[in-house]
Image: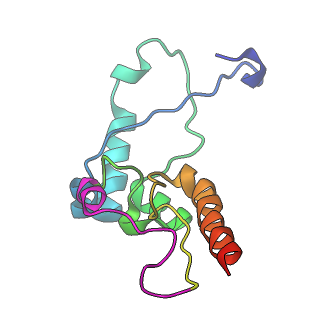
Amino acid sequence: MDPELCRDGWAPARLLGPMDFVEAERLGEQGQREYLSQLLDEHWWRDKIDDFRVLATRIPAQWGTEFHLYRDSMNPVMTAQFMRSGRFAHRSPYVRGLYLAGSSTHPGQWVSFCAISGILAANCLTADLTKC
């Protein structure tokens, strides 16, 4: 733990709970909130913690809405079928001059790759413009 992150005797921590993508879709937003509530009520993660405060929570449905994720997917584990079906190319093979960027493009497999995806799409555009 980085001591610089501690404030007023409190140290930040995150609790992540695994959730199968199909199960998250089946449960919907309310069911996801109930799962989170049950997880927070469990004692295994608090065994060596004297006191804690929950400052924020987030469920898959919130991630999807906030970050505009395809079917609320956060990673390839949650989107195995989507991953197997392939990703969009950065340059459209069907529409000349159409370039795509974002987490659904190849190889941007997670949200954090969106910026890299934009650079790769821009590289396609630059390469095409230099051919003219």
Q: Position of residue 98 (x, y in %)?
A: 55, 82
- Give the image location of residue 45, x and y in percent: 40, 22
Q: Is residue 30 left or right of residue 66?
A: left
Query: Which residue reaches farthest top?
Result: 48
Q: Is residue 50 located in the magenta-colored stretch of the structure?
A: no
Between 99 and 48, the one lying in front of the other is 99
Magenta stretch in the rendered image: 80-96
Q: Nearer the viewer, residue 62 or 115?
A: 115
Q: Quadrant of the N terminus?
A: top right
Residue 33: image x %, image y %?
37, 54
Q: Does 15 appear above or below 47?
A: below
Residue 8 spot, x, y in % from top left: 77, 23
Residue drawn where x is 50% and y is 16% of the image: 49
Q: Residue at x 56, y 50 (%)?
A: 112
- Per the picture, the main secondary structure of the magenta-coloured stretch is loop
Seen in the image, is 50 located left or right of residue 127?
Answer: left
Residue at horizontal 68 percent and vertical 22 percent from the top:
10
Image-quadrant location for residue 101 = bottom right
Kindly indicate the quadrant of the structure image that contains residue 11: top right
Q: Is residue 76 above or below residue 68?
A: above
Report how many numbered discs are placed on residues in the image.
Answer: 0
Residue 95 among magenta residues: yes
Which quadrant, please, contains the C terminus?
bottom right
Which is nearer the eye, 130 or 45?
130
Q: Is residue 53 left or right of residue 89?
A: right
**Residue drawn 60% across and 60% down?**
120
Q: Is residue 94 above or below residue 14?
A: below
Colour scheme of the rendered structure:
rainbow
